[in-house]
Image (cartoon, rainbow, N blue to C red):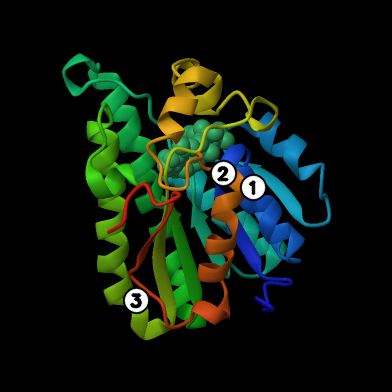
Amino acid sequence: MDLELENKSVIVSGGASNIGRAISLGFAAEGARVCVADIDEQQATSLAGLEPEKLTALRTDVTDPASVQATIDSVLREFGAIDVLVNCAGWTVDRLFIEKPREEWEKEIAIDIWGFINFTRGVLDHMIERRSGRVVSIGSDAGRIGEWREAVYSGTKAGVVAMSKAIAREVGRYGITLNVVCPGFTPGRAEESGEGSIWRGEQGSQFDDETLEKVAKSYPLRRLGRPEDIVPVVLLLASERASYVTGQTWSVSGGYTMI
Ligand SMILES: NC(=O)c1ccc[n+]([C@@H]2O[C@H](COP(=O)([O-])OP(=O)(O)OC[C@H]3O[C@@H](n4cnc5c(N)ncnc54)[C@H](O)[C@@H]3O)[C@@H](O)[C@H]2O)c1
């Protein structure tokens, strides 16, 4: 199936490491032009170096509306349009709710909720004017079930699902769709993780190989996710082929949740 993504203009927030990195490379492989909008400038720039014709790195802090707007303006100047926004930037560290410091909740809410709001609001005027657009957001199975040691993070991802549905109702009349793709446990790989990646910090160090093997056994498909597992579903939802799909939540998690 030709997804007709060639020459489409795409922004991937958090596009420099792991899942976002795989998504950025996936769009580039389809011939799209991709802005890797990530706070980790070094990782974004080194990724863009792999496909300089297709990938452009722009340092962006999704929690800061001025930074998001500057990136949107720059993409409109350079690429001439925005066909697709992928909201992928996210942050968490697993910890019991009763043990978690407030600063960590605030960071989760700032990146996972405000990041979605800032970028989605930022691209909509342009998409409404063009009567066309795709917003694909990376949620989480945590947001569907309320994951152990991920209370506020689960809430933020459930928020992304609910906001996507509500906005989808509002902007469907302009040919704009919003959908959410929910990974399960998809550990980052060291060689694909920049300084900004959660897998380089405490989150990564909590999971040694033995623990990861145990977790994998709780998945019907008996393995954990890989960043490239998420890509085909994102590409499909970003394409014209999915023009009649909106407000949906699609888990790509080896059957971890079945809702
Ligand atoms: N990996 C998993 O197990 C998993 C599971 C479910 C959902 N998710 C979601 O998938 C997405 C990607 O996860 P990942 O595992 O690749 O994470 P990651 O930490 O490896 O990558 C996240 C990227 O976001 C960037 N980022 C962080 N804060 C930012 C900010 N303020 N502005 C712009 N960019 C920022 C980081 O620099 C990094 O490149 C996240 O939304 C995450 O919540 C991941």
- Identify the residue position indicated by label 2 in the image: 19
Q: Residue at x 60, y 38 (%)?
A: 18
- Identify the residue position indicated by label 1 in the image: 22
Q: For ligand 1, tell me if the residue under mark 1 lies within 8 Å.
A: no
Q: Amino acid at mark 3?
A: Val
Q: Within 10 Å of the Cα at label 2, are there few (<14), some (14-19), or many (20+) other Cα atoms?
A: many
Residue 78 lies, with reference to residue 81, above or below; the image says above
Percent position of residue 232, x then y: 59, 61
Distance in Å between CA atoms under marks 2 and 1: 5 Å
Task: Report helix, strand or loop for mark 1.
Answer: helix
Residue 46 lies, with reference to residue 195, above or below; the image says below
Q: Residue at x 41, y 77 (%)?
A: 245
Q: For ligand 1, tell me if the residue under mark 2 lies within 8 Å.
A: yes
Q: Quadrant of residue 169?
A: bottom left
Percent position of residue 247, x then y: 33, 70
Which tag, 1 or 3, sits closer to the chain's start?
1
Instruction: Decide which of 242, 218 is in the foreground and name it.
Output: 218
**Residue 171: mark in rendering:** 3
Percent position of residue 160, x then y: 31, 52
